[in-house]
Image: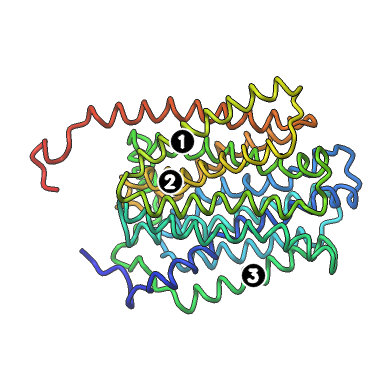
Amino acid sequence: MSQVATKPALKLSEFIPMMALLTSLVALSIDAMLPALTIIGEDLRVADPNAPQLIISMIFLGMSIGQAVFGTLSDSYGRKPTVYFGMVIFIAGCLISWTAPTLNLLLAGRVLQGFGVSGPRVVVLALVRDQYSGNRMAKIMSYVMMVFIMIPTVAPALGQGIMYLADWRSIFLVFIAIGLIAGGWFAVRQPETLLGEDRKPLRWQTIGYALKEIFSNRVAFGYTIAAGLISGAFLGFLTSIEPILKRQYGMEEAFAGYFAMCALFIGSASFVNSRLVERLGMQRLSQLAVTAMTVLALGFLAYLLLVDRNPALWTLMPYLFATLFCVGIMFGNLNSLAMEPMGHIAGIGASVVSAMGTLIAFPFSIIIGQAYDGSSAPMVQGFAFMGLTTLLLMRFIEAGRKKVPSPKAQGHRT
């Protein structure tokens, strides 16, 4: 087994916050924009009131493309150069959005931001997989998510504060500053985890072989789709929550506070998951969480019928808190389950898991967001549909897993 780093690995007390900060560039780029959507629409004279929600959705289009590229690059050129390349593209996208005179050009900048930020996102997953596996990997990812979730709790307030001091365009300058800080910390402190002898030549044959292996693996492929479905439901929430709270309930000033509470429930779920995953396992926890999310969604849809699709805010928020807690349990586990069979191709594996998950989630975020009709029903329907589909998919995956003899049963060395 070759050495995986040119110098000793970082202590978890530094490694986890660094990985969380790199990963959080995605959340920051999304959540800090939420308070600005209505203002951007007015400032750029956008006729369709739902059109500014594309500012959230389009970043995922860029990510779905970028994530298919960066993992492969990281397997060939190393983890660190791949992060640097992504950060440069992310900053270029921020500059385009900062100066954009029209919504279409701003959306083009957002696609570029998504493409660039997918570099750090993919490499973080590969870096963790380079050094950890199994439930230990899931535990580390839960810790990363737990620290990472601090960003969504403050990002809307950050965006709102920036607009009080300057304007919505200045939000992109803050993105650039935070990107430079995260990239600099990573460059100075993080060792390379993929040395030259472990790197794979950038050949189409190698990439094709890796893709064939991934797509033929029932567990890896199945849980990648499951992660995408749950992400789709969550992105439907992200694109819907601003019009729901602001237009439906008039929570202009309190929006950041309500969103922060939602994010805290995802963060608390990551903490609970980190404490339970080694005892109960990733699959069992995910099964419990998706079942609870589905039951909650179906129950709340029935309640919406009773109140003519217009629930009181004090009933909507507890539903969202409980649902997002379930989502938080699933985030790290489903991705880790998908990555588990792919340790020997961690970079390409991370690309496929992330790219496919985002590609599946992206259209649902648009469908749910653009379906906003003055009620929370489309968002809740998204959670119900994704939950039911994921439950059926997980049963299919695990049924197939039980039919495959273990390596020990086949006489292989473990």
Q: How many labels does the image show?
A: 3
Q: Tell me the residue that label 1 is attached to.
A: 226
Which is more N-terminal, label 1 or label 3? 3
Q: In which quarter of the image is the N terminus?
A: bottom left
Q: Which amino acid does label 3 sit on?
A: Ile
Residue 179 percent across, percent down from the top left: 62, 68
**Furthest residue toward front:** 314
Horizontal relation, residue 164 to residue 381: left or right: right
Q: Tell me the residue that label 2 is attached to.
A: 335
Horizontal relation, residue 142 to residue 65: left or right: left
Residue 1 or residue 402, whichever sits in front = 402
Q: Determine the CA span between mark 3 and mark 2.
A: 26 Å
Q: Which residue is drawn at 55% across and 36% down?
A: 360
Q: Tell me the residue that label 3 is attached to.
A: 178
Q: Residue at x 66, y 24 (%)?
A: 303
Badge 3: few (under 14), some or many (20 or more) residues near its Cα, within 10 Å?
some
Q: What residue type is labelled 1?
A: Ala
Q: Residue at x 57, y 43 (%)?
A: 324
